[in-house]
């Protein structure tokens, strides 16, 4: 079975672009090793322990930045292009990590977290569009899903380094990662042919295709003609344009549902508070080691989605992924229920680690990356920047609510109630995919729009 179909240089271009996703992964997991340090006096640059409320703000302000940033990035990605946007989007990370490296007040950590959120929101606006527009029909699913692999690798990087070095060293190391990305993306990732055609730069679009495909000129000209025909069928969209056709309305609703259900699985809460969650379970394994174990398994399992999304199909992977994740959260809820009722759980101290390990396996099998891979496939090109802006704002608003008030949720309904609530949303997620999402593998962007128009 041949997994890697299509021109090899499209893989190189996307791999360089995916370093942005790696950076986002480091920011997503940043609070997990940092918050425990700030809650003790050892290796704490503040000179005092932070309160639970301050810890909640550090965890949740990432999402706050993600709420407002799409307003910036959706404009830039259309006005200056995907490539320049891909460079500008890392500036917030650079400033955030340098600020956090030398911060001595809680307000500077807040500032850094908002900047990280602005950068993360930018990645979700810029990277999915870039990947879809440089990929081919035969490898679009694989390349789109590869973003999730790099994101998980970035998280593992933070979990593996953050607990064992000072906060200053940790942030300076992450600054170095950002500085590696900038030249890699600039030299190996061309502007997308779709954007260049839209800007009436056909010769540059042909040059981009030549780099990405390395095929005979006749084949490249045929693909260029197909791109022009597709874009010509799309009138320039507005926010109201999202709701002017049946296809765009359905694509928008599906995109909101897929990404919002992903948040309600509780995933960003787990990312932000993984060490704290393991502290609550009372597991015999050190919390920082638990985090590394979970992220390592998560990284290995994340490679299954790119390899299978163009073979088994997006819809099938999503259904399997969500079902498995649901079961794991139910089991984790049972553990917390026994613990909260003072039952002896010493004999099953391994259960929380195993539950989260298997949860992450199923999560990365499909539901981690595929909602964001499907979104740019189904949204019409003329409204994709506007629609993805709204989708991303909603996604991060939900994420902010969940991370900001997770401590209160745990206090109100306990660990059992919290994870059973998340599993209930996963059941609804499964039902939505089963009844509404159709298979997009192997279909051109034009064919997908025709299906949505029915």
Image (cartoon, rainbow, N blue to C red):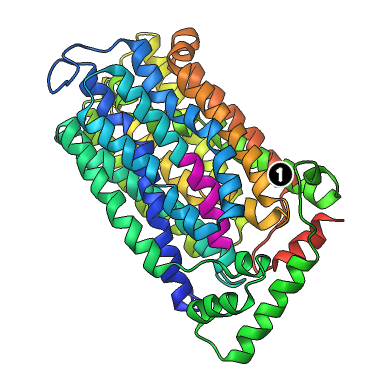
From this view, report whether residue 40 is shown above or below residue 121: above
Extent of the magenta region? 120-132
The residue positioned 21% from the left and 44% from the top of the image is: 173
Q: Is residue 368 magenta?
A: no
Whether residue 416 is visible here, answered yes or no, is yes
Residue sticking out furthest to the left: 42
Pinpoint residue 268: horizontal percent, then vertical percent: 45, 32
Q: Which of 233 and 427 is in front in this view?
A: 233
Task: Give 421 or 205, whichever is nearer the viewer.
Answer: 205
Query: Can the viewer see residue 292?
Result: no
What secondary structure is found at the residue carrying circle 1? helix
In the rendered view, would you say 143 is above or below 366? below
Residue named by callout 1: 254
Residue 42: give x, y in percent of width and height: 12, 19
In this rendered view, identify the residue nearer to me: 109 or 286: 109
Residue at x-position 44% and y-position 9%: 411
Image quadrant in which you'd find residue 135: bottom right
């Amino acid at each position: 079975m041949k997994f890697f179909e299509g021109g090899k240089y499209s893989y190189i271009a996307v791999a360089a672009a995916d370093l942005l996703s790696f950076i986002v992964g480091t920011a997503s997991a940043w609070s997990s090793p940092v918050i425990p340090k700030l809650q003790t006096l050892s290796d704490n640059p503040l000179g005092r322990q932070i309160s639970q409320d301050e810890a909640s703000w550090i965890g949740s302000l990432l999402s706050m930045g993600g709420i407002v940033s799409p307003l910036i990035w959706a404009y830039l990605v259309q006005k200056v292009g995907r490539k320049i946007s891909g460079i500008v989007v890392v500036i917030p990370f650079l400033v955030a990590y340098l600020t956090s490296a030398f911060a001595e007040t809680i307000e500077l950590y807040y500032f850094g977290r908002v900047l990280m959120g602005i950068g993360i929101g930018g990645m979700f606006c810029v990277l999915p569009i870039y990947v879809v527009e440089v990929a081919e029909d035969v490898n679009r699913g694989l390349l789109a899903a590869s973003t999730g692999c790099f994101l998980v690798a970035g998280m593992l990087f933070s979990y593996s380094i953050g607990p064992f070095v000072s906060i200053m060293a940790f942030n300076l190391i992450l600054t170095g990662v950002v500085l590696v990305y900038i030249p890699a993306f600039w030299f190996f990732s061309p502007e997308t042919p779709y954007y260049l055609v839209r800007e009436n730069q056909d010769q540059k679009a042909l040059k981009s295709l030549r780099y990405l495909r390395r095929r005979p000129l006749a084949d490249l000209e045929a693909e260029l003609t197909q791109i022009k025909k597709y874009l010509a069928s799309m009138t320039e969209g507005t926010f109201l344009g999202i709701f002017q056709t049946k296809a765009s309305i359905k694509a928008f609703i599906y995109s909101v549902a897929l990404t919002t259900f992903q948040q309600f699985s509780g995933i960003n809460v787990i990312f932000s508070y993984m060490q704290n969650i393991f502290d609550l379970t009372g597991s015999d394994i050190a919390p920082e080691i638990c985090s590394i174990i979970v992220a390592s398994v998560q990284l290995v399992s994340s490679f299954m989605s790119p390899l299978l999304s163009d073979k088994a199909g997006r819809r099938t992977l999503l259904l399997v992924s969500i079902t498995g994740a649901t079961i794991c959260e139910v089991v984790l809820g049972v553990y917390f229920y026994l613990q909260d009722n003072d039952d002896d759980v010493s004999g099953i101290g391994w259960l929380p680690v195993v539950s989260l390990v298997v949860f992450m396996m199923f999560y990365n099998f499909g539901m981690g990356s595929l909602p964001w891979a499907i979104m740019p496939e189904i949204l019409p090109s003329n409204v994709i920047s506007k629609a993805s802006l709204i989708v991303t704002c909603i996604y991060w608003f939900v994420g902010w609510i969940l991370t900001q008030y997770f401590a209160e949720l745990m206090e109100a309904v306990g660990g059992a109630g919290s994870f059973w609530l998340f599993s209930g949303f996963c059941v609804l997620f499964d039902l939505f995919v089963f009844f509404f999402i159709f298979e997009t593998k192997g279909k051109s962007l034009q064919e997908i729009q025709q299906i949505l128009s029915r």
